[in-house]
Amino acid sequence: MQEIIEYFPQILTALYETFLMMSITIAIAVTFGIPLGTYLYLIRPGAVKSSPKIYVVLDFIVNTVRSFPFLILLVAMIPVTRFIIGTSLGTGGVIVPLSVCAIPEFARLTEQTLLEVNQGVIEMAKAAGANTFQIIWKVLYREARSGLVSSATMLTISFLSFSTVAGLVGGGGIGDFAIRIGYYRYKLSVMLFTVILIVIIVQLIQTAGRIAIRKLDKRI
């Protein structure tokens, strides 16, 4: 208990760093991932704006980025990160590669979520004279909104674990703190406490996502 009290200010700092990394990363992933996923949905073979050649290229790029181990991507992107934000260290040094990794991941989740929308609803919108933009905004997104929230929830929980490698570039975070202080310095009580905090954070994210899904899903 004494060790936890001693390191508590640093734990609070680590929690703030994790919140900063995850909030910015998920915001960027949603902002760019939804349009990219929607475009993939629209141009896939047999879709509304089918363009197989472009789809194959984008599909390959998305799958390639998703297949990269984050640790390798983090190191490989150091020059790019330095060019974008002026440094490859600190929290920003983690946010850039996290975002690059999260955008195609959420794009794929978005595409899969849109594919689950009842095609009958889309056909009814077409029959009513709706254009592509109206179908996207008033039909697809409305029908898929609970699925998109569910995807964002899963993405947040998944990328919380990715943030544990933030220490490689001095990004901090609660996961990095657990390894750096709890494991390397053999502060087992501190490591256990931070692990419990991570579990609580995951449960809070899952609960918030579940509540949002229930409010948005008209089937529930």
Image (spheres, rainbow, N blue to C red):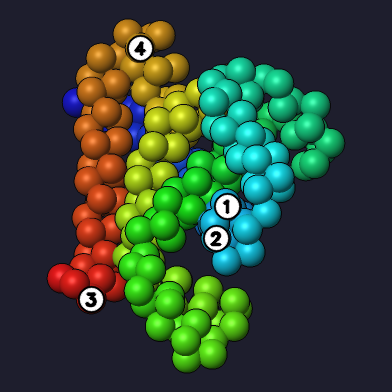
Label 1 secondary element:
loop
Residue 103 appears left or right of 198: right
Label 4 secondary element:
helix
Residue 122 appears left or right of 208: right
Of labels 2 and 3, earlier in sequence is: 2
Q: Position of residue 60 (x, y in %)?
A: 63, 34
Could you say which disc has been placed on residue 47 in the image? 2
Name the residue tied to disc 3.
218
Question: Which of label 4 and label 3 is nearer to you?
Answer: 3
Name the residue tied to disc 1.
44
Q: CA distance from mark 2 to mark 3?
A: 26 Å
Tags 1 and 3 touching, CB below 8 Å: no
Q: Residue 14 falls in which quadrant of the image?
A: top left
Residue plotted at (55% across, 60% down)? 47
Question: Which of label 2 and label 3 is nearer to you?
Answer: 2
Crowd tier of the residue under label 3, counting other residues whose Cα lies within 10 Å: few below 14, some 14–19, many 20 or above: few
Tags 2 and 4 touching, CB below 8 Å: no
Q: CA distance from mark 2 to mark 4?
A: 51 Å
Could you say which disc has been placed on residue 183 in the image? 4
Q: Residue 175 falls in which quadrant of the image?
A: top left
Count numbered badges in the picture.
4
Question: Which of label 1 and label 4 is nearer to you?
Answer: 1
Of labels 1 and 4, earlier in sequence is: 1
Of labels 4 and 3, earlier in sequence is: 4
Q: Position of residue 91 (x, y in %)?
A: 60, 37
Q: Look at label 1 and name its amino acid.
A: Arg
Q: Look at label 4 and name its amino acid.
A: Tyr
Label 2 secondary element:
loop
Tags 1 and 2 touching, CB below 8 Å: yes
Q: Position of residue 132 (x, y in %)?
A: 59, 77
Q: CA distance from mark 1 to mark 3?
A: 28 Å
